[in-house]
Amino acid sequence: MAANKISDRIYSVGVQNPDLRVFDIVMATKYGTSYNSYIVKGEEVALIEASHADFEGVYEENIRQVVDPAKIKYVILNHTEPDHSGALKDILRLCPEATVLASAVALNYLKNIVNEPFNSRPVKDGEVLDLGGVTLNFTTAPLLHWPDSIFTYCPEEKTLFSCDVFGSHYSSDKTFDKDIADVDGYKEAFKGYYDAIFGPFKPFVVAGMAKIAKYPFETVCPSHGPVLTKEGLLPYVLDSYRAWSKPVRNAVKTVPVFYCSAYGCTAKLAAAIVDGVKEVIPDANCEAYDLIKNDMAVMREKLNSSDAFAVGSPTLNADAVPPVWDLLAGIDAINIRKRPVAVFGSFGWSGEAVPNLVSRLTSLKTAVVGEGFKVCFVPTDADLEAAKEYGKQLAASIK
Ligand code: FEO
């Protein structure tokens, strides 16, 4: 898509990638994505975001439709993930006198992304840049979703450049939200994006939205997806972020017990652990879930919203089995810290599954109960009683 005018002083010059089906290796992108970038023109010119390196050619063409790149005085990076910083090195060759403005943390990252000297200046929270006839205000937004993130606000155009916040992996030949035909598709992409990118950072979303509440913005230019307007989807987007980011407390202690079991031995341990948990907390929401028979996305959600959890695996090829690792691959590493966890499993030969899982969960800073619990082959009545005791320890460790 070519460059497009957003307002008298703002132009969209980013690029579309409608064919992308996986973003950052792990995220499905059914509707493709866009790498948005914007030019703000006063007496001086600022470029906001720097697009993906793979699209540098079309990106440069889009910029040239609006301004001679040599006239760019500032390149502002709201954060430095390479989908927005990848083309920076090439762009700076077109405007070698430009100064890169970003948070101090971002400039530190950029040293190892650009890998050659460039002009730069860190911006502080509340700092204002005067471009002559138009200004830009900077607001730090830590962990939205990187440590280096900032928002940039243009008061003269009531426009917020929101970094990845309020974004969506939704490619469209329409620049503005109000022109999108497939609104349901957009909403699906928007929710998936929020869950994957901002789900782990909900307290920071709440804090970030409080910080920008002072700005009477009517247009939001995110780093991905359509430009959002108050007449279009912006009210929906803001309401959704508020609703989805509200802290949730479980009405009763919730302790899912996940397991895989080839011959029923680890399954018996799972049932005994459930009994142990329920003996200590009779009204606990505590059930055993066979990972082979349940939807993995649902299991991951149960794990991340738990008060404590248990995970059990037999040993196969000197390790825990793949579905168990798959479950842990979806763990919310930010919010899982200090959560009580029980690790268990039956094994035949060598029994590495339990220590390997304990090692991983310890590195995630969860509170693993003891050293895990493992049994060789078929659990005896005494083993099941010990597993129940282990479940009681797990329940007792919930604060
Ligand atoms: Fe779209 Fe965090 O980069």
Image (cartoon, grey):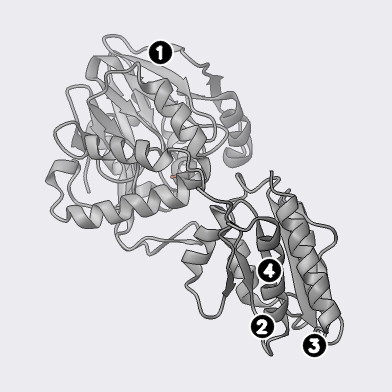
What whole-number distance in Å separates the C-alpha atoms at marks 2 and 3? Answer: 12 Å
Of mark 1 and mark 4, the one earlier in the sequence is: 1
Q: Which residue is mark 3?
A: 378
Q: Label 3 sits on what residue type?
A: Val
Residue lying at 38% horizontally and 30% vertically, measured from the top left: 48
Q: Is residue 325 left or right of residue 4?
A: right
Mark linked to residue 261: 2
| Label 2 or label 1, whichever comes before in sequence order | 1
Q: CA distance from mark 4 to mark 3?
A: 18 Å
Mark 4 sits on what residue? 275
Amino acid type of the residue tagged 2 in the rendering: Ser
Quadrant housing the C terminus: top right
| Label placed on residue 129 | 1
The Cα atoms of the two marked residues, 3 and 1, are separated by 70 Å
Tag count = 4
| Crowd rating for badge 3 (residues with CA inside 10 Å; few <14, some 14–19, many 20+) | some
The amino acid marked with disc number 1 is Leu
Q: Is residue 399 left or right of residue 15?
A: right
At horizontal 14% and vertical 42% (from top left) the residue drawn is 178
